Amino acid sequence: MNEAQFIYFSIISIGSILGANLRYLILTRLGSKKLNNRRRLLFINSIASMILGISISLNNYNNILYREFIILFLIGFAGSLSTFSTFIHDLFKLSIKRKYKDITIIIFSSVFLGLISILIGLFVGNF
């Protein structure tokens, strides 16, 4: 591993640690708010999508930010904050129970809210 790879690895690791810890805090704080697990995960994935949209817009239109800052937020923080593995695991559990209506609702709501959140992030980043 050369020096540049080590630096990128370190930046991604820092972002991942921050994103995973924030996800844990959000899940535990929202756990006391009478939200079911699916809604909490949908909320977290929407936040991660919004961060993704903001980072993409800043990367495209603002040359002041460094590549490392974008990598920190896009790959490390937003990637660790999002709960794609839990999303897939929930779909798998529902498919075993043959709850296809719930699977369809989860897929469409996750994709729809994810796209809306990215658009909001793009708008905020361009503002």
Image (tube, helix red, strand yellow):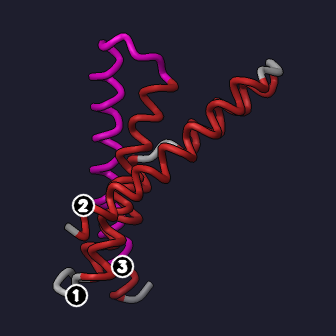
Residue at x-position 40% and y-position 82%: 5
* Picture quarter with the C terminus: bottom left
Residue at mark 2: 124
Label 1 residue SS? loop
Instruction: Provide residue 76's location: percent of width, then percent of height.
Output: 37, 61
Q: Could you tell me residue 21's position as x and y percent?
A: 30, 41
For the residue marked with disc 2, what is the amino acid? Val
Q: Which residue range is magenta in the image?
A: 8-37
Q: Quadrant of residue 95?
A: top right
What numbered label is drawn on residue 6?
A: 3
Q: Callout 1 environment at 10 Å: few (<14), some (14 to 19), or many (20+)?
A: few
Q: Residue furthest left?
A: 64
Mark 3 packing: few (<14 Cα in 10 Å), some, or many (20+)?
A: few
For the N terminus, the quadrant is bottom left
Asked if disc 2 and disc 3 are in contact, CB closer than 8 Å, the reply is no
Percent coordinates x, y for residue 4 in the rendering: 35, 87
User: In terms of image quadrants, where is residue 88?
Assistant: top right
Which amino acid does the dot numbered 1 rest on? Asn
- What's the CA distance linking mark 3 and mark 1? 24 Å
**Residue with the mark numbered 1:** 63
Residue at horizontal 44 percent and vertical 50 percent from the top: 116
Which secondary structure, mark 3?
A: helix
Of the two numbered discs 1 and 2 on the same chain, state the one appearing first in sequence: 1
Q: Residue at x 27, y 82 (%)?
A: 61
